Image: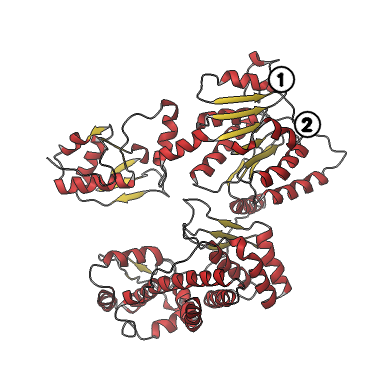
Amino acid sequence: MTEIILKQDTNISRLQLNTSMIWEIKDNRILFYATDYELCRTLNVENPREVFRLFQYLQKPRTIEDVKQYSRLSAVQLRSLVNYMCKKGYFKTEDGNVDSMDLRLSHLLDALPSIDRGKVLDEFHQLKIVIIGVGTMGSYATDGLVKLGINELTLIDADCVEAKNISAQNYTSNDIGSFKVDCLASKYEAEPVDLYKHKIMLNSYKELNEIVDLRKIDYLITSDDDYQLNRDIWSHVFTEFPRIKCVTGGYSLFKSSAFVLSKNNWKKYRTAMDRAQKSLSSAIILSNDGTIFNAMMYGLVIPKLVFDDVTGIEKTTTATFDYLQNNFFLGNMHDFEYYKGFKKNKQKNNVLFTKQVSCTQNWFKRDQVKIGILNDNFDRTQLTTHENLYIGEQTFEGLPNNLKDLRPNRLITFSVKPEVVRSSLMKYIKNHFSNKIFTDSNRVFDNDLILVDPGIYGVRRNYTEWTNDVPLIYINSEGQGTEALEVIHEVFHVIFNHFGNDSYEHESFVLKNTIEFINSYPDLKIGKNLGRQLIKQYKDSYIDFKIVAELEKSIVLGEQNSFLTWFSNAEGNGQEKQLLKLVNQYVEQGHPFFTLRYLLAYEENKKELETLEKWCE
């Protein structure tokens, strides 16, 4: 009998395959997330068909004793596989059943990578949400939030159900004449939700604060039609209770929109709404004619905004639906800029492209040892001057014998938020660049063009995209506490676009100015901390980029064997997985020497980095 020792929890007694992840055996490979092109992965195992038979057996919960007696796999493979699958969350290990009310949502959460289903469900159950106005926007939002597992809702509305409401709102003909909040309370009486109701028409934030203990509230859904009331609420709540988030929106006959407001972005939204209110002509005639499309949109969007916020899968703040042209958007404000550009170009029958980057299609191909050989169609004339000069340099012999010696010690640093360095950064920019560059850089902060940590499934790197000549900065520090350093780096990227588009000059410019800014930082403690972060970052990256550049050079020159010999001597034996990881991460089949610009930027600023390192000691 196979002895299975579960490293993370010896009390587990039952196992079941996480079937929500959609497993498939295809061409003797086991795929998971098999029906999703972007998420699809391969599980690399010996005897894949026998392993898949085990997975079929574990579609239903099995005891540990049952699994121990499974004889189609060796004891060693079974033990290793079970521990790996449990560690990754691919096997469910909970005893006991999930509450039937949460079953469908649990399946969704189980399918999401890197999500702790139990923790998220607990967070949903503990949320406290206030909905102001339960008409077209609020009535179906209530329904969606109850089904999401929210256990405490407060509904505020003084209106009674009218016949005209029935076709668009979450009420029936039997509700006509009754208070809306009473109807919804009755509708969800049997559900596991504490539903508090207030039959009043709010006129001010003060009145809201008198009837609701806002210290305990997580979200305010301001779904009424009173903009001045909403404005009064925003002007106070984010100062007095900064943890609260507001979901607000509006609709017309063909359009609906919703936005998540927080202490960080509410002023920008208020300014935009004030401008919109002033632009309305006194002669304009409007009617409140929300349809079922408006109502159902909010029934979907408001729970999804809360879901994304709690799970962290996306920093979703914006939703817009156009029912006439069938244009729909749900995402963050940066992606909304792309959406607006797409919509604008769609109306012109044009296609929207980002800035083109010259590349050589499939310049190399993988061989049996997973390193790569030069494609017969490769055209070396497409390489840049920098790349040709690098190929002509001495290969391998001039590098350190042991790359491990270069890897930096663990430097102790602390997290610095971007807002801490803003004023000093803008002062540096004002002293070193033109007034136009200073104004444009300030606008990056003022217009909320920096998105920090967009979500756990966002692109795991920092970058700046341009749409309609607007720079959108994405920062994903992966919990390393380097957000301020990454923002500094990307702002200098934006600045360089005023001078040219040479990618090699670009990276050297950014690193040079980042070093100079850190050296001039007025707060010595923060400046040295930023310096340590930069040094560690570049030392780690330099080694990886150097290996990748030498590998790519060896592919172009046909000297892969010499490279592999050098790499084995420098990194030690058994490092094939490390090399393969670097190839997968940094070598782009459509763009040779893509990371060379970063390597050369380091080498051009090496002395400055060494001086900075001494200063930071």
- Residue 598 in the image: state x and y as whole percent: 47, 74
Q: Which mark is residue 160?
A: 1
Residue that label 2 marks: 287
Residue 322 left/right relative to 589: right
Q: Is residue 385 visible?
A: no
Considering every residue shown, the one lying at the far top of the view is 174
Considering every residue shown, the one lying at the far right of the view is 283
The answer to which image quadrant residue 168 occupies is: top right
Q: CA distance from mark 2 to mark 1?
A: 19 Å
In the displayed structure, 152 sits above or below 250; it is: above
- Residue 210 in the image: state x and y as whole percent: 70, 32
Residue 132 left/right relative to 391: right
Label 2 with label 1: CB-CB less than 8 Å: no
Residue 601 left/right relative to 285: left
Type of the residue with mark 1:
Cys
Please name whichever residue, 84 or 611, is drawn nearer the observer in this view of the structure: 611
Mark 1 Cα shell of 10 Å, populated few (<14), some (14-19), many (≥20): some
- Residue 40 in the image: state x and y as whole percent: 37, 48
First of labels 2, 1 by sequence position: 1
Type of the residue with mark 2:
Ser
- Residue 311 in the image: state x and y as whole percent: 48, 43
Q: Residue at x 49, y 38 (%)?
A: 123
